[in-house]
Protein backbone atom coordinates (compact mmCIF):
# COMPACT_ATOMS: atom_id res chain seq x y z
CA UNK A 1 0.00 0.00 0.00
CA UNK A 2 1.40 3.38 -0.92
CA UNK A 3 0.87 6.66 0.84
CA UNK A 4 -1.09 9.33 -1.07
CA UNK A 5 0.95 12.18 -2.48
CA UNK A 6 0.79 15.39 -0.48
CA UNK A 7 -1.16 18.09 -2.34
CA UNK A 8 0.97 20.73 -0.64
CA UNK A 9 3.71 19.96 -3.16
CA UNK A 10 3.13 22.48 -6.02
CA UNK A 11 4.60 20.05 -8.52
CA UNK A 12 1.64 17.70 -8.11
CA UNK A 13 -1.00 20.32 -7.39
CA UNK A 14 -3.83 20.29 -9.96
CA UNK A 15 -3.70 24.07 -9.92
CA UNK A 16 -0.24 24.10 -11.52
CA UNK A 17 -0.07 22.61 -14.99
CA UNK A 18 3.10 20.93 -16.19
CA UNK A 19 3.69 23.64 -18.79
CA UNK A 20 3.51 26.50 -16.31
CA UNK A 21 5.65 24.55 -13.85
CA UNK A 22 8.41 24.07 -16.42
CA UNK A 23 8.18 27.73 -17.38
CA UNK A 24 8.38 28.61 -13.71
CA UNK A 25 11.53 26.53 -13.37
CA UNK A 26 13.06 28.49 -16.26
CA UNK A 27 12.23 31.78 -14.60
CA UNK A 28 13.59 30.45 -11.32
CA UNK A 29 16.87 29.68 -13.07
CA UNK A 30 17.03 33.13 -14.65
CA UNK A 31 16.17 34.88 -11.39
CA UNK A 32 19.28 33.46 -9.77
CA UNK A 33 21.42 35.45 -12.18
CA UNK A 34 23.55 38.09 -10.50
CA UNK A 35 22.66 40.88 -12.96
CA UNK A 36 19.10 40.01 -13.83
CA UNK A 37 18.13 43.59 -14.68
CA UNK A 38 21.26 44.30 -16.71
CA UNK A 39 22.39 43.43 -20.19
CA UNK A 40 24.26 40.18 -19.64
CA UNK A 41 27.21 38.63 -21.34
CA UNK A 42 26.81 35.96 -23.96
CA UNK A 43 27.46 33.08 -21.58
CA UNK A 44 24.88 34.16 -19.02
CA UNK A 45 21.92 35.65 -20.87
CA UNK A 46 18.82 33.48 -21.16
CA UNK A 47 16.63 34.57 -24.05
CA UNK A 48 12.98 33.62 -24.54
CA UNK A 49 12.10 33.63 -28.23
CA UNK A 50 9.24 32.48 -30.43
CA UNK A 51 8.70 31.87 -34.10
CA UNK A 52 5.36 33.69 -34.04
CA UNK A 53 4.84 37.20 -35.46
CA UNK A 54 5.84 40.09 -33.25
CA UNK A 55 2.28 41.04 -32.40
CA UNK A 56 1.21 37.58 -31.28
CA UNK A 57 4.52 37.15 -29.47
CA UNK A 58 3.88 40.26 -27.42
CA UNK A 59 0.35 39.08 -26.59
CA UNK A 60 1.64 35.61 -25.69
CA UNK A 61 4.24 37.16 -23.42
CA UNK A 62 1.59 39.18 -21.59
CA UNK A 63 -0.69 36.12 -21.29
CA UNK A 64 2.17 34.02 -19.94
CA UNK A 65 3.11 36.70 -17.41
CA UNK A 66 -0.50 36.96 -16.24
CA UNK A 67 -0.83 33.17 -15.95
CA UNK A 68 2.39 32.81 -13.98
CA UNK A 69 1.43 35.67 -11.67
CA UNK A 70 -1.87 33.92 -10.93
CA UNK A 71 -0.14 30.60 -10.36
CA UNK A 72 2.39 32.22 -8.07
CA UNK A 73 -0.42 33.62 -5.93
CA UNK A 74 -2.02 30.16 -5.71
CA UNK A 75 1.15 28.44 -4.48
CA UNK A 76 1.86 27.71 -0.85
CA UNK A 77 3.96 30.75 0.20
CA UNK A 78 6.24 28.44 2.22
CA UNK A 79 7.01 26.11 -0.69
CA UNK A 80 10.47 26.21 -2.29
CA UNK A 81 9.08 27.01 -5.73
CA UNK A 82 7.02 29.88 -4.38
CA UNK A 83 10.02 31.34 -2.57
CA UNK A 84 12.24 31.13 -5.65
CA UNK A 85 9.76 32.01 -8.41
CA UNK A 86 10.04 35.63 -9.43
CA UNK A 87 9.05 37.22 -12.72
CA UNK A 88 11.76 39.28 -14.40
CA UNK A 89 11.77 41.42 -17.54
CA UNK A 90 13.12 39.93 -20.74
CA UNK A 91 13.75 41.17 -24.25
CA UNK A 92 12.19 40.16 -27.54
CA UNK A 93 15.14 39.39 -29.77
CA UNK A 94 15.94 38.32 -33.30
CA UNK A 95 18.59 35.79 -34.23
CA UNK A 96 21.25 36.47 -36.85
CA UNK A 97 23.85 34.06 -38.18
CA UNK A 98 27.18 35.42 -39.40
CA UNK A 99 29.29 33.42 -41.81
CA UNK A 100 31.84 36.20 -42.31
CA UNK A 101 34.25 37.06 -39.54
CA UNK A 102 32.84 39.76 -37.30
CA UNK A 103 34.62 42.97 -36.25
CA UNK A 104 35.79 43.25 -32.65
CA UNK A 105 35.18 46.07 -30.15
CA UNK A 106 37.01 46.32 -26.82
CA UNK A 107 35.84 47.96 -23.61
CA UNK A 108 37.05 49.82 -21.57
CA UNK A 109 37.86 51.84 -24.68
CA UNK A 110 41.07 53.29 -23.26
CA UNK A 111 42.60 49.79 -23.51
CA UNK A 112 41.54 49.25 -27.13
CA UNK A 113 44.55 50.77 -28.90
CA UNK A 114 47.07 48.87 -26.79
CA UNK A 115 45.19 45.57 -27.11
CA UNK A 116 44.79 45.95 -30.88
CA UNK A 117 48.51 46.56 -31.38
CA UNK A 118 49.51 43.66 -29.14
CA UNK A 119 47.10 41.30 -30.90
CA UNK A 120 48.40 42.32 -34.34
CA UNK A 121 52.00 41.82 -33.21
CA UNK A 122 51.39 38.47 -31.53
CA UNK A 123 52.02 35.09 -33.11
CA UNK A 124 49.22 33.33 -34.96
CA UNK A 125 47.30 36.55 -35.62
CA UNK A 126 46.80 36.17 -39.36
CA UNK A 127 43.02 36.32 -38.95
CA UNK A 128 43.18 39.85 -37.44
CA UNK A 129 43.77 43.21 -39.05
CA UNK A 130 42.70 46.84 -38.98
CA UNK A 131 40.66 48.42 -41.73
CA UNK A 132 42.05 51.19 -43.89
CA UNK A 133 40.27 54.43 -43.01
CA UNK A 134 39.08 57.07 -45.43
CA UNK A 135 41.01 60.35 -45.25
CA UNK A 136 38.71 63.34 -45.65
CA UNK A 137 38.60 67.06 -45.00
CA UNK A 138 36.59 68.54 -42.19
CA UNK A 139 33.92 69.70 -44.63
CA UNK A 140 33.62 66.28 -46.23
CA UNK A 141 33.41 64.59 -42.83
CA UNK A 142 30.55 66.87 -41.80
CA UNK A 143 28.79 66.20 -45.09
CA UNK A 144 29.19 62.43 -44.82
CA UNK A 145 27.91 62.41 -41.25
CA UNK A 146 24.55 63.58 -42.61
CA UNK A 147 24.24 60.81 -45.17
CA UNK A 148 25.99 57.71 -43.77
CA UNK A 149 27.11 56.06 -40.55
CA UNK A 150 30.55 57.15 -39.37
CA UNK A 151 31.72 54.33 -37.11
CA UNK A 152 34.87 56.07 -35.94
CA UNK A 153 36.76 59.26 -36.76
CA UNK A 154 39.81 61.08 -35.49
CA UNK A 155 41.79 64.14 -36.47
CA UNK A 156 44.93 63.31 -38.40
CA UNK A 157 46.12 66.90 -38.73
CA UNK A 158 44.40 70.28 -38.92
CA UNK A 159 41.49 70.03 -41.37
CA UNK A 160 42.20 66.37 -42.20
CA UNK A 161 40.40 63.43 -40.59
CA UNK A 162 40.51 59.65 -40.73
CA UNK A 163 37.10 58.02 -40.66
CA UNK A 164 35.83 54.46 -40.74
CA UNK A 165 32.51 53.65 -42.38
CA UNK A 166 30.73 50.27 -42.72
CA UNK A 167 32.23 49.72 -46.19
CA UNK A 168 35.76 49.77 -44.70
CA UNK A 169 34.83 47.03 -42.22
CA UNK A 170 33.04 44.95 -44.85
CA UNK A 171 36.17 45.07 -47.00
CA UNK A 172 38.10 43.38 -44.17
CA UNK A 173 35.40 40.75 -43.67
CA UNK A 174 35.54 39.98 -47.39
CA UNK A 175 39.18 38.95 -46.84
CA UNK A 176 38.04 36.51 -44.11
CA UNK A 177 39.61 38.52 -41.29
CA UNK A 178 38.40 40.06 -38.04
CA UNK A 179 38.55 43.85 -38.14
CA UNK A 180 39.96 45.10 -34.82
CA UNK A 181 38.42 48.45 -33.95
CA UNK A 182 39.66 51.13 -31.56
CA UNK A 183 36.20 52.72 -31.47
CA UNK A 184 34.02 52.84 -28.39
CA UNK A 185 31.09 50.44 -28.01
CA UNK A 186 28.68 53.34 -28.61
CA UNK A 187 29.08 52.59 -32.33
CA UNK A 188 27.46 49.15 -31.86
CA UNK A 189 24.03 50.42 -32.89
CA UNK A 190 25.31 52.00 -36.10
CA UNK A 191 27.13 48.78 -36.95
CA UNK A 192 24.06 46.62 -36.40
CA UNK A 193 21.86 49.01 -38.38
CA UNK A 194 24.36 48.48 -41.20
CA UNK A 195 23.96 44.70 -40.74
CA UNK A 196 27.41 44.34 -39.24
CA UNK A 197 27.35 42.42 -35.96
CA UNK A 198 30.40 43.16 -33.77
CA UNK A 199 31.93 40.97 -31.13
CA UNK A 200 32.04 43.07 -27.95
CA UNK A 201 34.73 42.08 -25.45
CA UNK A 202 34.55 43.47 -21.94
CA UNK A 203 37.88 43.20 -20.08
CA UNK A 204 37.16 43.40 -16.39
CA UNK A 205 39.47 45.71 -14.46
CA UNK A 206 39.64 45.45 -10.67
CA UNK A 207 41.91 46.40 -7.81
CA UNK A 208 43.58 42.99 -8.16
CA UNK A 209 44.71 43.31 -11.78
CA UNK A 210 44.84 47.06 -12.38
CA UNK A 211 48.65 47.22 -12.33
CA UNK A 212 48.85 44.84 -15.32
CA UNK A 213 47.29 47.47 -17.57
CA UNK A 214 49.73 50.30 -16.88
CA UNK A 215 51.72 49.82 -20.09
CA UNK A 216 48.57 49.60 -22.24
CA UNK A 217 47.24 53.04 -21.38
CA UNK A 218 47.70 55.82 -23.96
CA UNK A 219 48.51 58.29 -21.21
CA UNK A 220 49.36 57.95 -17.51
CA UNK A 221 46.40 57.76 -15.14
CA UNK A 222 46.27 57.24 -11.41
CA UNK A 223 44.95 53.83 -10.44
CA UNK A 224 41.93 55.40 -8.78
CA UNK A 225 41.05 57.47 -11.85
CA UNK A 226 41.59 54.54 -14.22
CA UNK A 227 39.35 52.29 -12.12
CA UNK A 228 36.67 54.98 -11.97
CA UNK A 229 36.71 55.37 -15.76
CA UNK A 230 36.51 51.61 -16.22
CA UNK A 231 33.44 51.39 -14.00
CA UNK A 232 31.77 54.18 -15.97
CA UNK A 233 32.45 52.30 -19.20
CA UNK A 234 31.03 49.12 -17.69
CA UNK A 235 27.66 50.82 -17.28
CA UNK A 236 27.52 51.41 -21.04
CA UNK A 237 27.18 47.65 -21.52
CA UNK A 238 23.66 47.76 -20.08
CA UNK A 239 22.40 49.76 -23.07
CA UNK A 240 23.82 47.49 -25.78
CA UNK A 241 21.31 45.99 -28.22
CA UNK A 242 23.32 42.74 -28.26
CA UNK A 243 25.24 40.47 -25.92
CA UNK A 244 28.91 40.78 -24.99
CA UNK A 245 31.68 38.49 -23.77
CA UNK A 246 33.57 39.04 -20.54
CA UNK A 247 37.26 38.46 -19.87
CA UNK A 248 37.38 38.03 -16.11
CA UNK A 249 40.35 39.17 -14.04
CA UNK A 250 41.22 35.61 -12.96
CA UNK A 251 41.45 34.30 -16.54
CA UNK A 252 44.95 35.64 -17.13
CA UNK A 253 48.11 36.56 -15.27
CA UNK A 254 50.34 38.02 -17.99
CA UNK A 255 49.93 39.94 -21.22
CA UNK A 256 50.66 36.77 -23.20
CA UNK A 257 47.88 34.94 -21.37
CA UNK A 258 45.50 37.85 -21.92
CA UNK A 259 46.14 37.76 -25.69
CA UNK A 260 45.49 34.02 -25.74
CA UNK A 261 42.23 34.47 -23.83
CA UNK A 262 41.14 37.26 -26.19
CA UNK A 263 41.79 35.08 -29.24
CA UNK A 264 39.85 32.19 -27.67
CA UNK A 265 36.94 34.50 -26.81
CA UNK A 266 36.81 35.92 -30.33
CA UNK A 267 36.79 32.43 -31.83
CA UNK A 268 34.09 31.33 -29.39
CA UNK A 269 31.87 34.36 -30.06
CA UNK A 270 32.25 33.96 -33.82
CA UNK A 271 30.59 30.54 -33.60
CA UNK A 272 27.60 31.81 -31.64
CA UNK A 273 24.24 33.03 -32.85
CA UNK A 274 23.91 36.81 -32.61
CA UNK A 275 20.84 37.94 -30.63
CA UNK A 276 19.72 41.52 -31.28
CA UNK A 277 17.20 43.47 -29.24
CA UNK A 278 15.79 45.57 -32.08
CA UNK A 279 13.85 47.80 -29.66
CA UNK A 280 17.25 49.13 -28.51
CA UNK A 281 18.31 50.23 -32.00
Image (cartoon, helix red, strand yellow):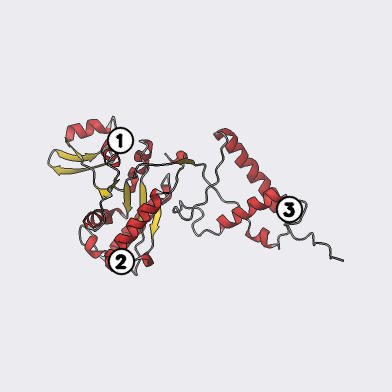
Q: Seen from this angle, which residue lies furthest right?
A: 1
Task: Give the residue furthest to the left.
Answer: 158
Say which residue appears at 32% left-offset and 45% top-offset: 103
Which residue is under mark 1?
149
- Calculate the distance from the C-alpha at mark 2 to the C-alpha at mark 3: 50 Å
Mark 2 vs 1, N-terminal side:
1
Label 1: how many Cα within 10 Å (few below 14, some 14–19, many 20+): some
Secondary structure type for disc 1: loop
* Residue density around tag 3, few if under 14, some if 14–19, many if 20 or more, within 10 Å: few
Residue positioned 38% across, 39% down in the render: 192
Q: Quadrant of the N terminus?
A: bottom right
Residue carrying label 2: 210
Q: Where is residue 64 shown, x and y percent of the image? A: 64, 44
Q: Is residue 86 visible?
A: no
Image check: 91 left or right of 256?
Answer: right
Q: Secondary structure at mark 3?
A: helix
Percent of width and height locating residue 31: 56, 56
Measured from the top left, where is residue 277 in percent x and y? 46, 42
Is 236 on the left-hand or right-hand side of 18? Answer: left
Q: Could you tell which of marks 2 and 3 lies nearer the N-terminus?
A: 3
Q: Position of residue 48 (x, y in %)?
A: 55, 46
Callout 2 crowding tier (Cα within 10 Å): few <14, some 14–19, many ≥20: some
Q: Which residue is mark 3?
A: 74
Whether residue 156 is situated above or below residue 261 in the rendered picture: above
Residue under the image location 49 percent in, 57 percent down = 35
Label 2 secondary element:
helix
Quadrant of the drawing holding the C terminus? top left
**CA–CA distance in space, label 1 to label 3:** 52 Å
Residue 105 to residue 259: above or below: above
Residue 216, disc: none
Cα gap from disc 2 to disc 1, whole angstroms = 34 Å
Q: Quadrant of residue 102?
A: top left
Amino acid sequence: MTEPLSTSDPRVSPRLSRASFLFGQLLQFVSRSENKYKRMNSNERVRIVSGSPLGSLARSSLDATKLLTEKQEELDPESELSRNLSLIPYSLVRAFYCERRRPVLFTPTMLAKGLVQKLLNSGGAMEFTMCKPDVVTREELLRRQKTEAIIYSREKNPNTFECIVPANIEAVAAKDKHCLLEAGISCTRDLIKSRIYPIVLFIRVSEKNIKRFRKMLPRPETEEEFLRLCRLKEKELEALPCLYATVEADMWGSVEELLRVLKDKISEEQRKTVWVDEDQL
